[in-house]
Image (tube, rainbow, N blue to C red):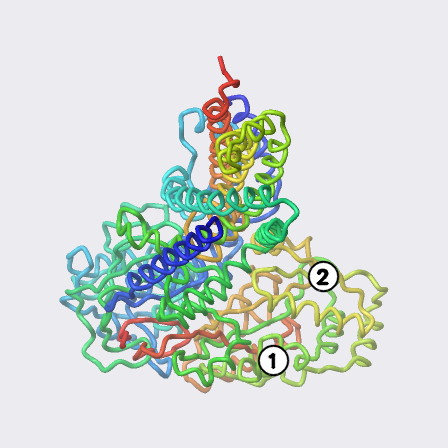
Amino acid sequence: MVATMLVVATLVFIVTNLIPGSPAALILGEDRTPEQVVELNRELGLDRPAAVRFLLWAGQLIRGDFGRSLFNDRSVAQVIYSRLEPTILLTLSSAVIAVLIGIPLGILAAVYQRTVLDLGAMAVALVGAAIPNFWLGLLLILAFALRFKMFPSAGYTSLSDDPGATWRYLVLPAITLGVSHAGVIARMSRANLLEVLQTDYVRTARSKGLRERVVVNKHAFRNALVPTLSVVGIALALMIGGSVITESVFAVPGVGRLLIESVLRRDFPMIQGVILLIAMLVALVNLLVDLTYALLDPRIRYG
Amino acid sequence: MQTLNRSRFVRRLLQISLFFFVSVGAAFAQSGDTLIVAIKAQPPTLDMHATTNNLVRNVAMHVNEGLFTFDADFNPTPMLATGFERSDDGLIYTIGLREGVTFHNGKGMTSEDVVASLNRWMVRSSFGRTLARFVESLEADGPYEIVVTLNEPVNFVITAFATFRAGPAIYPSEVIERTGDERITEIIGTGPYRFVEWAEGQEIVLERYEDYQPVDMAASGYAGRREALAQTLKFIFVPELSVRRVGVEAGDFHMALDIDPESFDSYIDNPDVQSFLGAPRMTTFIPNKSQGIMTDITMRRAVQAAVCVEDILPVYGGEDFWRVDPSVTWQETAWWSDAGSELYNVCDAARAQELAQESGYDGEAIRLAVSTGDDSKFNVALILEQQLEATGFNVEVEVRDDAAHGAIIDDPSMWDFAISEHTYRTHPILHSHLQATWTGWWESAERDRLLSEFLVAGSEEETHAIWDQIQGLYYDDVVVIKIGDYFEHHIASSGLQGYANMPEPFFWNVSVGE
């Protein structure tokens, strides 16, 4: 994992520093003078060659220091930390919604294969996976914020300030993000369950006279869950870095939105810090998924 | 039996969902004494000296004040100052300060704070630097008086002290000292609201400053009595335009800034939403006068002759949102002029072709740089491209995001023309085009001569006459090709009361009704 992070860090630095752009021009505004730009570049350390900046940054990283934001001069680690809470809550609640919608839909479609229910469930899954996040988000805002006034249209309140308000702000974004992943999870659960339902041990269970519900729930579902879990893992990883649009639409101050804002501002240390964090979280999620396999499938052992 | 169970299950699921949505809806309520303003992005800083960024001004102007400000007729009016005296030779300004004004940390404001703040402003701010060229010395004369001594009797000292964008906000001297060469992070001022919290990426929270000492004068424009009618003032960062709109319509925000002009018509008959035409702005087409094909003045005149502004301005929405106007200063100031207007909106393809031929134009590509920050700029570029191509010019539109555009625009080898949108300002001296160092690099001995005369002109008539000559020179030299003026659009919920709708939006004296 350390080697992976090292490669990611180097690549991220090279890519971000290749993008043309002037953070100083954006900070100083329309009426900047060339002298102001030169001075601010010096202040931000951008007058140094890229190789020197990389060595300085790598040195800081080794000491656990992610540097300071070029945009607002705050500590990168502190800014990311302050943006983690909404992203983690949004990711987890979206994952719960995705699983709660996706897996039952998949089971329903597999159990009632080639029926109207199957077709209906898969149509819902397809629509869920295909619908653009920003469009679904706006539809939900129009319906539940503007029309029925059930939820706030945008914004966020920290858990430490008002836990009740936090989840009210998260309901619509979580549905938006969750629905798009529910479709994929539903299709994968269906495929996996269908495969398991055709195995010999399922046929044996049925021939023993077990009720269909027991066959599906006890014998087939758990075995179909292992490959489905890897899809859920991938969905989680995608949500961590891929909630950019949902966070922007609902003005949720999360890490995804921070990344896109930082790219637009050419806030190089912030981009590097966020991508490193996302890479780390994705690696961690993959590790957790691998460990969970062993819990679900006794045949899998590590060590 | 199974069917019955399933339908019972579905019914139960629906009941739970309904309960969930209704209970959540009931739990969500808007707090009463908080004024919420949705802005499109997070400002980079709240240090008013450091940048001309409008987001910074929009928030920080509630916390920090200057010595002077503008009244509803844009006359400079004392704010933290009591007034000023100008010596007969115009070289010495003696400015009195109000007594009893306290900063948000409880400390009383004195000349020490003012001198420290103005000295920093004259180093950090682009406008401050303009004034600094003429300042011989700046000294305190007792705790409540400062003396500004000039090396030339320039006439814009008080105007410069009244400006908001990158304006001379007054901070406590110890904050200036602690900050050194960095950006100010201790947001302490004398304003009606005090800084409470900056939730990263989410919002900036200000609260009423209970010990605020308002000016003893009726409110007029930015001047006069300021009162924090709402206990809390929140600026929420909402990047998505449609969500800023829906947020006001749904009552989640009391005001949303920077709304698309196209939505104006939809609010005309909406009793729940107030719609405001905001500050006038200006779009120009800037030729690169330092390097490349546009250094040739005949080529610039050829392009100037080809531009038809009436085909371009509708990109800013309905007719309420734009106007055809030759003046390079706004009608909303005292500096409107029609000098050189015969060269504005010429829209004569034959004349353009004749001039292009005269300059020996051989079809070389003209690089037109535009940023994607605002859709309007991109649309202006596309229409200009069509107009110029139709006249026989070979135009290559180069589109970049704001940061990339900002980088190339400072490099004269990278572009021939650029689209620029200029924020409203109250005095010609605040126009960046007047500086030779600004984008486009206008070097002119005649401009320098006129400008030095303009800055020291004694009477109002004389000053205006010189400004007319400068604007005439703008058109003759084709410093910029003006497209026209357009307006910002803001919306508010019907409960918002007392909003003055000045070009720079502010929320003191504004309350939130039912």
Q: Is residue B296 above or below residue A13?
A: below
Please state the horizontal and vertical placement of residue B296, each as a whole percent of the image. 74, 66
Please state the horizontal and vertical placement of residue A12, each as a whole percent of the image. 56, 35
User: Which of the pair A16/B443 is nearer the observer?
Assistant: A16
Does residue B385 show up?
A: yes
Q: Is residue B32 left or right of residue A231?
A: left
Q: Which mark is residue B74?
A: none
Local secondary structure at mark 1: helix
Q: Is residue B92 above or below residue B6?
A: below
User: What chain is tagged by disc 2?
Assistant: B
Quadrant in the picture for the C terminus of chain B:
bottom left
Residue B161, quarter of the rendered image: bottom left
Q: Are marks 2 and 1 in contact (CB under 8 Å)?
A: no
Q: Is residue A120 left or right of residue B211?
A: right
Quickly name the residue at label 1. B472
> Residue flagged by tag 2: what amino acid is it?
Val
Residue shown at 83% from the left, 71% from the top: B392
Does residue A49 show up?
A: no
Residue B211, quarter of the rendered image: bottom left
Earlier in the chain: of badge 2 and badge 1, it is 2
Q: Is residue B376 left or right of residue B511?
A: right
> Residue flagged by tag 1: what amino acid is it?
Gly
Quickly name the residue at label 2. B397
- Observer-side mark, 2 or 1, equals 2
